[in-house]
Image: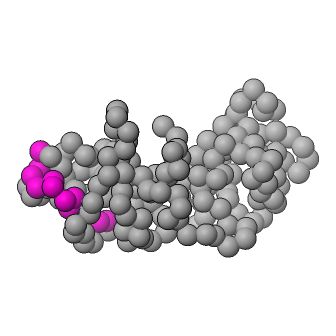
Amino acid sequence: MSSERDGLAVIGRLTSVFGVRGWIKVHAYGDSPEQIFDYLPWRLPTAGGWRELEVDEWRPHGAGLVVHIRGVDDRDLARELCQQDVWADLSQLPALADGDFYWRELIGLRVVTTAGLDLGTIASLLETGANDVLVVAPDSHSSDDRERLLPYADAVVVAVDLEAAVMRVEWDAEF
């Protein structure tokens, strides 16, 4: 499933039930987990369109968050919502400074070295402690069939051109 559609973007995931009164654990994507509550109401995809969720309570729990959704007052109803992505309206996301990008903007970009070698396209990103990592998957335009993991760091990423859908990198193709 794409991380963006119908003017919406994935901002987190409902993971598992918490207790017996309808509470659900939430994994929020982003630098600050609590920011997920800046993008209410949440939406879930259904066969007939989008279902809007109204969070009526939330609180931190350990390293994560738990939420209560209005009208979901028991464990069985909560379980039906688990293992689903949480979507929010793209217009609610804050504008970024020049040179900063949302991951969703980078996924799908063609990655080309400064020497002109085509490495493939960005399939996903991984969050690590030091810096994010680009997962570059080979495709029919790639110079070879190797998947590469490139650090998303200033020393590697030379330029990002969203209009041309290309990221230029300083990278040795042997790595």
Relative side of 167 to 58, left or right? right
Q: Looking at the picture, tell me which residue is in the foreground, 55 or 66.
A: 55
Task: Name the spot of residue 94 as percent of width and height, x first.
Answer: 55, 69
- For the point 66% across and 52% down, the residue is 106
Q: Looking at the picture, tell me which residue is in the foreground, 161 or 170.
A: 161
Quarter residue 21 falls in: bottom left
Which portion, as a residue range, is magenta? 64-76
Q: Which quadrant would the C terminus be assigned to in this image?
A: top right
Is 61 above or below relative to 69?
below
Task: Name the spot of residue 14 as percent of width and height, x first.
Answer: 31, 52
Membership of 121 in magenta stretch: no
Is 145 above or below relative to 85?
above
Is 103 above or below relative to 4?
below
Task: Name the spot of residue 137 as percent of width and height, x first.
Answer: 66, 37
Q: Can you see residue 171?
A: no
Membership of 69 in magenta stretch: yes
Task: Name the spot of residue 87 as percent of width and height, x first.
Answer: 42, 52
Q: How many marks?
A: 0
Q: Can you see residue 121?
A: yes
Quarter residue 35 falls in: bottom left
- For the point 67% across and 67% down, the residue is 100
- For the point 52% across and 40% down, the residue is 2
- For the point 32% across and 52% down, the residue is 52
Quarter residue 68 falls in: bottom left
Q: Residue furthest front?
A: 48
